[in-house]
Image: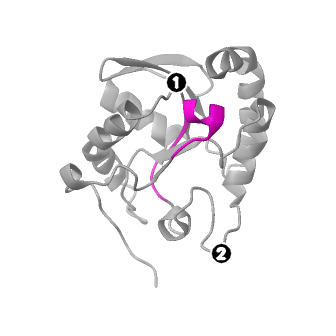
Amino acid sequence: MSVEQEHHCQDIENYDLNLFFQEGVGIGKKVLILGESPAENGWRKSGKACYTPKGKLLPTGKRLNELLEPFNLSVETCAFTELAKCFVGKNRQLLLKCSQNCWPILTKQLESKNIELIISLGAQTIEIINFISFNKLKIGELSKIIINNHEYSILPIYHPSPINPYGRQKNLDIISRNKISLRQIVF
């Protein structure tokens, strides 16, 4: 049975900070992969980022692993969360409002972890981050962002979904261009 929407943005004071937050392992504790919102058949049902309820790695996860492999990281070892903690279904117009409402949850999650690098997924995610945080971050450019008086490195990439026919190569180029700087941040 499919749920049309699922909102967590209306009671942020009682939100469990572990919901839709995957703790990183090893050096992956320093790296946060930031998606836009929980996918319908992803970890809303499986409890694990980029996995189906039957334990199969989603194509997006496979592409992320390809990008992270040069750093001995993976979606399984990096921290992972969503900008909006809500499932908006087909009503994409709610994404901005839900993200704004969920921003305090994200900032609490960031503050409670030792994150140094945020990899944001997709044009929509970075547009919303820019809107909320009054930044001008661009896809492919490794930058610094201040969130609640804490500085993070951030690398916005194209969404790694196979639906984006050019995203894979563009993301590989982004990682290649930033490889040395990323290694310095993570190691």
Residue at 74% x, 45% y: name it: 65
Residue farthest bottom in this picture: 1
Of the residues shown, which amino acid type is indicated by label 1? Glu
* Residue 86 pos. (x, y %): 36, 58
Q: Which residue is mark 2?
A: 54
Q: Earlier in the sequence, mark 1 or mark 2?
A: 2
Task: Check if residue 36 falls in the magenta segment.
Answer: yes
* Residue 143 or residue 131, whichever sits in front: 143
Give the secondary structure at mark 2. Answer: loop
Residue at 40% x, 62% y: name it: 87
* Left or right placement of residue 10 versus residue 115 in this view: left
* Residue 114 pos. (x, y %): 47, 28
* Left or right placement of residue 143 versus residue 181 in this view: left
* Residue 105 or residue 143, whichever sits in front: 105
Crowd band around label 1 with a 10 angstrom C-alpha radius: few (<14), some (14–19), many (20+): some
* Residue 65 seen in this snapshot: yes
Q: Is residue 116 above or below residue 167?
A: above
Q: Quadrant of residue 31?
A: top right
Residue at 74% x, 52% y: name it: 62
Of the residues shown, which amino acid type is indicated by label 2? Lys
Task: Check if residue 4 falls in the magenta segment.
Answer: no
Q: Which residue is mark 1?
A: 116
* Residue 180 pos. (x, y %): 74, 15
* Left or right placement of residue 105 versus residue 142 in this view: left
Residue at 80% x, 31% y: name it: 70
Q: Which residues are magenta?
A: 23-38
